Image (cartoon, helix red, strand yellow):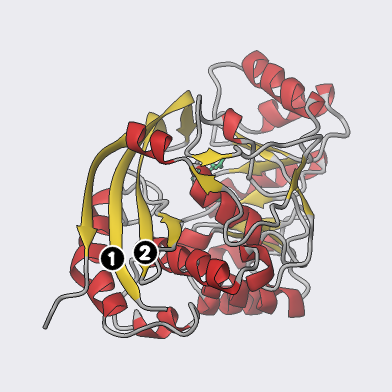
Amino acid sequence: MKINRVVLRHMQMKLKAPFTTSFGSFTTKEFILVEAIDEDGVSGWGESVAFHSPWYNEETVKTNWHMLEDFLLPLLFRAPIEHPDELNSRFSGIRKNNMAKAAIEGAIWDLFAKKQNVPLSVALGGTKKQIDVGISIGIQKSIDDLLRIVERYACEGYRRMKVKIKPGWDVEVIRELRRKFPDVPLMADANSAYSLKDIERLKALDEFQLLMIEQPLAADDIVDHATLQAQLNTPICLDESIHSYEDARKAIELGSCRIMNIKIGRVGGLTEAKRIHDFCQTHHIPVWCGGMLEAGVGRAHNIAITTLSNFCLPGDTAASSYYWERDIISPEVIVHNGTITVPDNPGIGYDVDRQQVARYTTFAKTYRPSLD
Ligand SMILES: O=C(O)CCC(=O)C1=CC=C[C@@H](O)[C@@H]1C(=O)O
Ligand SMILES: [Mg+2]
């Protein structure tokens, strides 16, 4: 594939409801939409999941734009691409900045699948035609508000409920949830709000048959998580701690987790996500696809990777309508009784709605290979 040009668009989409975690709350999602166009005029689409501020990891919308403009696109334009797997090594001289790498790599994977005339899921080696999905619910003002939201989405058939916890909003909240929903598949995401000093409080969650506790300790830790997992019956799931195949290998070797949340942007792209998936599969560690409040392009990539066989727990890929008044893809992502039917059109499988894209674009810039 010879890339003729890449368009970066800075997007702003208003969330239907504020998203609150132990770090704070926001109501608008800013992100970069990447369109890579080849010499035949075919477009591949990617979406950066970096937030406006560095609360989830060290990347932001602005750092991603800088990395794409000054480093990654010049490397992309340097030579034609036979297969998207090449980009991992082509970008290997750039440290970290995984979300920026994943944004352009995802666009190239979409373009590659379209050129092969196969769905992205098939190009990745996925086999599932339907995927089970869960829903992630931010911290609410009251337990009653949380119970009402869980009730609504359990009735809609979502296969798993993910609620946020933090010190002071944990044991009592989970107890009330279990009282009202004794059988609903339930997990808690702590977003690193605890330390080993809280071990007794975290052990108290063992009585509630949670599917997992996600990222209870520091975002860059795998050692203390191993100490904690040895004392918890509930499986620990790592999210923020896992940035690469190497991190996944070390976490499994140390026994830091029994489940892994794979986010394409956090690990640097679909190629690395697939490597981690395969490694976890050989070590009997189930994985699921985390979410980053993606718009439709990122959501489509998440659906495609979730068709790999070891994605055996429901992920955070809810319907477009859970986040947006109008998404940027057509058709939008629909969840029916907790499942998504995997599109079988070429590439990401959804059309990008250019009218909606234009509506949410605040500014855009086109990049071409330099003439030298
Ligand atoms: O995209 C979704 O619906 C899930 C969003 C979500 O739960 C998260 C996004 C980013 C950081 C966290 O707060 C949390 C997560 O850890 O997965
Ligand atoms: Mg998480």
Q: Residue at x 57, y 46 (%)?
A: 198
The answer to whether residue 334 is visible is yes
Q: Residue tagged by mark 2?
A: 37
Q: Position of residue 255 (x, y in %)?
A: 67, 72
In x, y percent, where is residue 263?
54, 58
Q: Are marks 1 and 2 in contact (CB under 8 Å)?
A: yes
Quadrant of the snapshot with the N terminus: bottom left
Q: Amino acid at mark 1?
A: Arg
Question: Closest to the observer: 97 or 349?
Answer: 349
Question: Disc number at residue 161?
Answer: none
Q: Which of pointers 1 and 2 lies earlier in the amino acid sequence?
A: 1
- On the rendered structure, is 242 left or right of 5? right
| Measured Cα–Cα span from mark 1 to mark 2 | 5 Å
Q: Quadrant of residue 152?
A: top right
**Quick one: SS at disc 1?**
strand
Q: Residue at x 76, y 21 (%)?
A: 151
User: Which disc number belongs to residue 5?
Assistant: 1
